[in-house]
Image: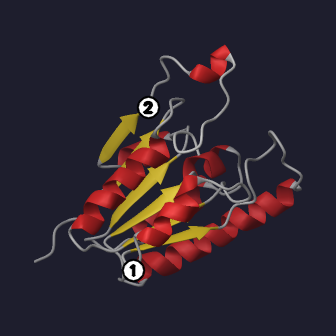
Amino acid sequence: MSEKGLIIVYYGNGKGKTTAALGVALRAIGYDHNVCMIQFIKGEWNYGELYSSNRLKPNFELIVTGKGFVGIIDDDHLIAEHIQSSKNALKIAREKIISNKYNTIILDEINYALKLDLITENEVISLLNSKPENLNIIMTGNHLSNKILDLADLVTEMKEVKHPFKKGVKAKKGIDF
């Protein structure tokens, strides 16, 4: 008999949501589990996960679908492009979920995509309801809807207490990206 999979959510305005999800992935891979991470928003910057994920193969698959952060910094995409990439991420997530190849699937920044109306709450709930009993799903992003809170088994809020950016310190390689 296999164990019941969990729906885990890391959200809030503090740093560490993706990092927490990757920590679970690292732990799972230690037990020879297979993990797939689908990134809904990140996509056009170079960041550490792109490089380190290759070292975790064949147990770890990273799929980058995003067009980058929406409406900030250097976003030069139409909102329609962001919507399309998030819809594509949902399609890929559904395929990975029903494939039965993974123990854990990380839906990185899915809660941002939801908050920005790139995808709908009904689409996300349908996706979560399609998961096999033994699959773990981890969701990250700043926001959390009440309906997803109700579906989740574990919810951790990352709360910013202090951040170096407020003192003018720029993002650091290996820490922030």
Which numbered mark, 2 or 1, is in the foreground of this view? 1
Q: Are marks 2 and 1 in contact (CB under 8 Å)?
A: no
Residue 5 seen by the camera: no
Seen in the picture, residue 128 relative to 167 is either above or below; the reply is below
Q: Report helix, strand or loop for mark 1.
A: loop
Question: Residue sitting at 66 percent across and 67 percent down?
Answer: 65
Position of 72 with respect to 135 (left or right) is: right
> Residue 41 is drawn in which quadrant?
bottom right
Question: Residue sitting at 41 percent across and 54 percent down?
Answer: 22
Name the residue nearer the viewer: 110 or 19. Answer: 19
Name the residue carrying label 1: 58
Name the residue carrying label 2: 158
Seen in the picture, residue 42 relative to 163 is either above or below; the reply is below
- Location of the N terminus (image quadrant): bottom left
Instruction: Give the CA separation, mark 2 to mark 1.
Output: 30 Å
Residue 104 x/y as whole percent = 35, 67
Residue 28 x/y as whole percent = 27, 64
Position of 57 with respect to 91 (left or right) is: left
Sooner in the amino-acid sequence: mark 2 or mark 1: 1
